[in-house]
Image (cartoon, coloured by chain):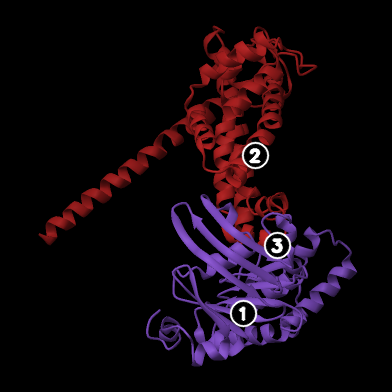
Amino acid sequence: MSSRALLTEKIAFFCLLLCTLIIVIPVILITAVIVKNGIAGLSWEFLTQSPRLGMRAGGIFPAIVGTVYLVLGTMLFALPVGILAAVYLTEYAKDNWLTRVIDIAIVNLAGVPSVVYGLFGLGLFVVFLKFGASIIAGSLTLAIMSLPVIITASREALNTVPQSFREVSLALGATRWQTIRHVVLPNSISGIVTGTILALSRAAGETAPILFTVAAFYLPRLPQSLFDQCMALPYHLYVLSTQVPNIKPHIQYGTALVLVLMIMIMNIVAIVIRSHFRKKKLW
Amino acid sequence: MKTGKLDIHNVSIAYGEKKALQGITFEIQDKEILAVIGPANSGKTSLLRTLNRLNENKSGFKISGSIHLDGVDIYKDIAVSSLRKRIGMIFALPNPLPLSIYDNIAYGPRMHGKRKKSDLDQIVEKTLKSAFLWDEVKDRLNLQALKLSGGQQQRLCIARTLAVEPEVILYDEPCSGLDPISTAKVEEAMVELKSVYTQILVTNNTKQAARVSDRTAFFLTGELIEIDVTEKIFTVPNDPRTEGYVSGRFG
């Protein structure tokens, strides 16, 4: 009987390990393929010049700039709304029907497919509000898509602050807002920032939400205002892969590599911030 | 008519359906140490949290009756933050904020608008001395408060409460996590503070109540059974239940 238990144990261990390894394999393969095919395309010119010859030559500078603008715009809209909503929900909201409706809304918002956000952005920002296809319309669409993630991550971070910290502050006669400002936020900001960066890095790689709201097929000059269209890396990659015949693969893969690197850098920044604060954290 | 520092009149509280205090009426005299004793679920902690209104954020909290501080109804006629400035609280577990010793004490005064470094320096020194902690920490005020020992942390919490110049201090089993020597130091501080503050001590340690308090109130399942001079409670109480509790027969 005990030898049988031992065997079961071994099988279980093997299955668990196998499944864990299966997670790693695609990551390694994707990275390997992109790096192998894309590294040849990377050059200073590729990063700093506009596409030429029907995108078969030149660089991807306008797409990089466009993606940076979109990420910054998304942050500008989503960060304050997301964090303040999370603060309201964790610190002020009582457990009543309104709060429960908001909770359900957030969960459902997180489950909406990204192409639906794209259509929604088209309908609301581009057409109804007459922003046209523009950076502001794209950023707002990406912001709405990022909100549930930012709110959820921020709420989790706020909830890690011990209740006793809040009570001490209140018991000393501080107001609720003073308590949030001086005790709760300083002790949760690392989690909030980390969650936000991860949400933004996802937004940076999205194609569907920007498809109808901002992304330009080919626009070699840089956008001049929030109401201009711009190129963006994910959409540019889509165009290079499907719409441009006879293109050299190193341009496609080089574009993919740049996009992956940008997102990776954002994630690394998030990890560094988190570990930096974790070291300082005493409780 | 009303003469005490705090007048508690026919106060009942409940969390949703669960009643925690029922028809409590008594007075707390100016500058006395009142011990509140009783077994678990007797409503001791609920009483404290009702006095500084920390209860009211709990869902389903309901209160009836009235509580007056110097004749002012604390649930009607005073802003909650100014009430809590006047009625400070020491919690069961020492709970310094993750700040330096100095910033912990300066926290309250800063929230109430004191910003001048020299004022704050003075407050830090004075309150740490009152809490018998100054000599142990005067050379390392920038040390993380969480690195202090449990007993030192609790005295820091007392100093921090003193820093906002309260009139009443509530202690919620302040020594439950402390060793006997640290406990003695906290008790020493309480007795020393008697000349200035009204103090209410909730404790599970009846001996502690006997050692430091002037009067003692005995609570049982949300009701005030008896309140009297401490010596009397511990020698010839009126109610047999009080006698049973203080002599260790139940609780």
- B75 relative to A30 in the view: left or right: right
> What is the display colour for chain B?
purple
- A100 relative to A47 in the view: left or right: left
> What is the display colour for chain A?
red
Q: Is residue B25 above or below residue B113?
A: below
Cβ–Cβ under 8 Å for marks 1 and 2? no
Image quarter (top left, top right, bottom left or bottom right) of the C terminus of chain A = bottom right
Q: Badge 1 is on which residue?
A: B34
Residue A83's label in the rendered image is: 2
Q: Comparing marks 3 and 1, which lies closer to the viewer?
A: 1
Q: CA distance from mark 3 to mark 1?
A: 19 Å
**Residue type for callout 3:** Arg
**Residue type for callout 1:** Leu
Residue A248's label in the rendered image is: none
Identity of the residue drawn at 70% across and 18% down: A135
Few, some or many residues within 10 Å of mark 2 (<14, 14–19, 20+): many
Q: Comparing marks 3 and 2, which lies closer to the viewer?
A: 3
Whether callout 3 and callout 1 share a subunit is answered yes
Q: Is residue A15 above or below residue A165?
A: above
Picture quadrant of residue A61:
top right
The kind of secondary structure element at disc 3 is helix
Q: CA distance from mark 1 to mark 2?
A: 44 Å
Percent position (x, y) of residue B126? Answer: 81, 78
Q: Badge 3 is on which residue?
A: B84
| Chain designation of label 1 | B
**Residue type for callout 2:** Ile
Does the rendering let one see residue B84? yes
A90 and B24: which one is in front? B24
Percent position (x, y) of residue A50? Answer: 72, 16
B50 and B229: which one is in front? B229
Whether callout 1 and callout 2 share a subunit is answered no
